[in-house]
Image (cartoon, coloured by chain):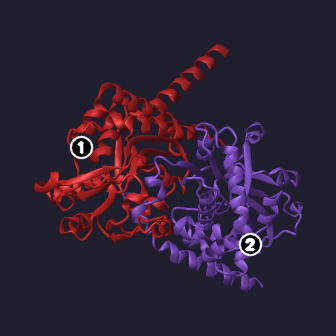
Chain colours: A red, B purple
Amino acid sequence: MHMKFRLLAAFALLLMAGSSAGFAQEQPVELDANESPPYWSASMPMDGLCGEIVHAISAAAGLVSHINYKPLQRLIEEDGNNDLGNPNFYMANQDFAAIVPVCIYQTAIFYYAPRHKKGINIQRVEDLKGYRIGILSGALVDHAYFEKAGIVFEQSYSRESLFKKMLLGRIDLCIVADMAGHQIISRLFPEQHDDFVSIHLPGSSAPLAILLDKNYPHAAAIGKRYRQGLQSIIKSGKLDEIVLKHFDNQHVSVEWLEPLERFSRVYNFIDSEEDE
Amino acid sequence: MKNLTSKNISFALALLFLLTLMLPVTASATGPRVTKALFGVDKTEIHVLDFPPFLSNEVADGGPFSEIVNQALQEAGIDAVISTHPVQRIVRYYLLQENALAVMGWHLNFSSKAKEGLIFLPVAVMVEKFYYYKPFFLNGLNWNGKLTSLKGKTYAANKGEDVAAYKAAGITVKYARTVGLLKMIAAGKADFTAIPALTADWLIAKYMSAEKANFAVMDRPAGDNVFYMIFNKQHPQGEASAAAFKTALRAMVNDGRYAQIMEKHLGNGETLKLYMGNVKERLAQ
């Protein structure tokens, strides 16, 4: 009788373990994002650059991920969902069981070369002085610092208008996310594509990540599989392939690896975070 | 007095709100934030805990603590940029794992061994208030200045907070990050929590505006808490930078520039007094 009970208990445990492992394989993992082309976009194939990376990681990990697009305010207010994006943006209001950086975005300064034939080199704040600089409305943080340094910004409500103003000579430079800038140029000014120059800001790397809510079923286990999936597509060259496609054959994914590893270390602690 | 304080808090929040209008939320999600740090690849990075409205990318000039610290760093000859992070654990990671020059925050919960390698300098001393959720205490909730008057209740504490006094008074303790403390009392998982009033009002307005009327504050202050700049002795410039920063900050406190910056952000009323604690005396120690 005792033996029979132990066999039944073992069988029940096996069933539970099977259903737990099977959950992640059979049910899509629901992830919420804000429409932010070309990083996350419902209108782009495979949900854009980072969306495609998430799907490739999922496939390598034996998972299926489904991206839902929601208005930004809803993403901010919802604190029980899984998110895609910059962890800093979401962590203020929500605790996560796993944060897996999958993509790096950088900031670049763009200018229209025919209007600046000698070229422009910007690395330090002081180098900005004397230029009319366009930025997205609301992007300026250290207002007093830049004002004191004599740097003036012109704010616009859309990235597209920043590039139009540059072409017309109303501003000299604009500061936007690098891929967003390249995409706008390709879309609005395909014939002048090579006339726009981008200056990379090396200190501007920031992560875009999969964030799994602390109460999402099997979140820690799914997070672990996403991490394994990421390592797998780095090794297989799939990550490079995706990035090459989106970056017009520039090998930028090589530059991603170091910050991606660093941010993976920074955010990896969340898994083991306990109430102190 | 209560009305006066509430009027001043409203004024300070209105002032902060006006400053915040310069930073609509769309920019933070889809575009880069144009900060000094963006051009600071060759500069020292100081990692700080996001603490609105006193220190945050969502406030113009980063808020009063950020402006004070930036000015003191400049006068101390420390060429550094400030990077804000949402949780204590990330700030601790950069300090202890990546050997950062300095970090800033509160409730950072260092081990006694780690503390030996650190230099703590107070940047602000803030009065905290006890908050509770009215629907769970229809007759109100108060304390008499002794924690034992709250015996049997559950306190929502910041992760990393020293809670020995609460436990000794027979109070159960549960932990969360600052915004989580308010959510915890709203969900009935804890009875009360301690937060600086401006921070509580800020977080409620941003994340829980529909429930604003349900939050109540106890009359008697919960006590003081200190926001620290923490220098790393393991960093080659750690001790020298700490000494230079302390000299610069003391000069700003003594000649009134510290108060001027606080006034610019918080107005010149009763509210200001809540965040202008004995930083001068603490720096002299």
Horizontally, is A249 left or right of A133 in the view?
A: left
Q: Give the residue type at disc 1.
A: His
Mark 2 element type: helix
Q: Position of residue B14 (x, y in %)?
A: 57, 79
| Circle on res. A91 | none
Crowd class of label 2 (few under 14; some 14 to 19; many from 20; radius 10 Å): some
Residue most extreme to the left: A191
User: Which residue is label 2 attached to?
Assistant: B274
Crowd class of label 1 (few under 14; some 14 to 19; many from 20; radius 10 Å): some
Horizontally, is B219 left or right of A92 in the view?
A: right
Q: Position of residue A222 (x, y in %)?
A: 46, 36
Question: Which chain hosts label 1?
Answer: A
Is any part of residue B124 visible from this angle?
no
Quarter that holds the C terminus of chain B: bottom right
Which quarter of the figure has residue A11? top right
Q: Position of residue B274 (x, y in %)?
A: 74, 72
Quarter that holds the N terminus of chain B: bottom right
Residue most extreme to the top: A3
Q: How many marks?
A: 2
Question: Which chain hosts label 2?
Answer: B
Q: Which residue is nearer to you in this view: A264 or A97?
A: A264
Residue at 37% across, 38% down: A256
Is any part of residue A20 visible from this angle?
yes
Kindly indicate whether the residue at mark 1 contacts the one at mark 2 (C-beta within 8 angstroms): no
Q: Which residue is nearer to you in this view: B180 or B128?
A: B128
Residue at 31% across, 68% down: A132
Mark 1 element type: helix
Q: Give the residue type at disc 2.
A: Leu
Horizontally, is A180 left or right of A25 in the view?
A: left
Which quarter of the figure has residue A209? top left
Give the CA separation, mark 2 to mark 1.
52 Å
| Circle on res. A246 | 1
